[in-house]
Image (spheres, rainbow, N blue to C red):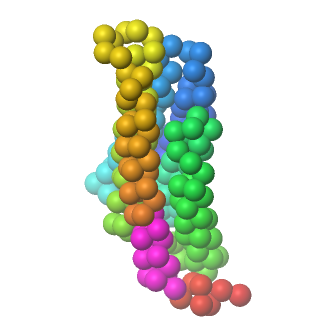
Amino acid sequence: MNLPNKLTVLRIILVPFYIFFLLMPGIPHHYLIALIIFAAASYTDHLDGKIARKYNMITDFGKFADPLADKIMILAALACFVQLGLTNAIVLTVIISREFMVTAMRLVASSKGKVVAANSWGKAKTVSQIIAVLIILILQYILELGNMKLINNDTTSLSVPFWIAGEALLWISAALTVISGVIYIVQNSEFIKNAK
């Protein structure tokens, strides 16, 4: 297994760790710890692709596993956000639906010996989701600091605006998710038409 593929696997391995810290409000600075782990996992997404392209280490495993790792990373964060009341289930359902459709199409293509790699719309979708998750974690950490009385300003009045900002970011990424899904389906419609 080459280095880019190891980084992809590392991204999946990091997921349970940020889930643990994200869902543990009893641990001081848990949002910060989750943020650092999620940011590190997100950076592996940038790094594995860069290394694979620069050193010609692109593999079929990487083409398939890299977007799968992205899905696991993002969907785990969004599921935690639903549990924590930081978003609603509609956003998560829209994003999951698109991911299942594209993954199913990739599996059909794979059974025919073809690999459907990520395109620029899929990458823009992933970047928007990562940015949304990171900003929401930062905003929640600010609120956590206020609750811990570690900052002078009263942050209780910020909880609703922060929630609205997070929802707006997630809906923007959900819209990009739908657009990228439609583009994937159109670009790879032969796999759907020829599915048996």
Q: Nearer the viewer, residue 45 or 113?
A: 45
- Above or below: residue 117 compared with residue 141: below
Residue 156 is inside the magenta segment: no
- Above or below: residue 77 compared with residue 145: below
Report the side of 76 relative to 138 (left or right): right
Q: What residue sits 60% from the left and 28% below the top? A: 23
Q: Nearer the viewer, residue 151 or 25?
A: 151
Q: What residue sits 50% from the left and 21% below the top? A: 30
Q: Position of residue 80 (x, y in %)?
A: 59, 39
Q: Nearer the viewer, residue 16 or 149?
A: 149
Q: Which SS type dominates the magenta stretch?
A: helix
Which residue is outermost to the front?
157
Number of numbered tags placed on the structure image: 0
The answer to whether residue 57 shows anywhere in this view is no
Which residue is outermost to the left?
54
Rendered image quadrant of residue 41: top left
Q: Position of residue 121 (x, y in %)?
A: 36, 67
Q: Position of residue 21 (x, y in %)?
A: 56, 25
Q: What residue sits 57% from the left and 38% below the top? A: 85
Q: What residue sits 37% from the left and 21% below the top? A: 155
Report the magenta residues as a range.
177-189
Rendered image quadrant of residue 163: top left
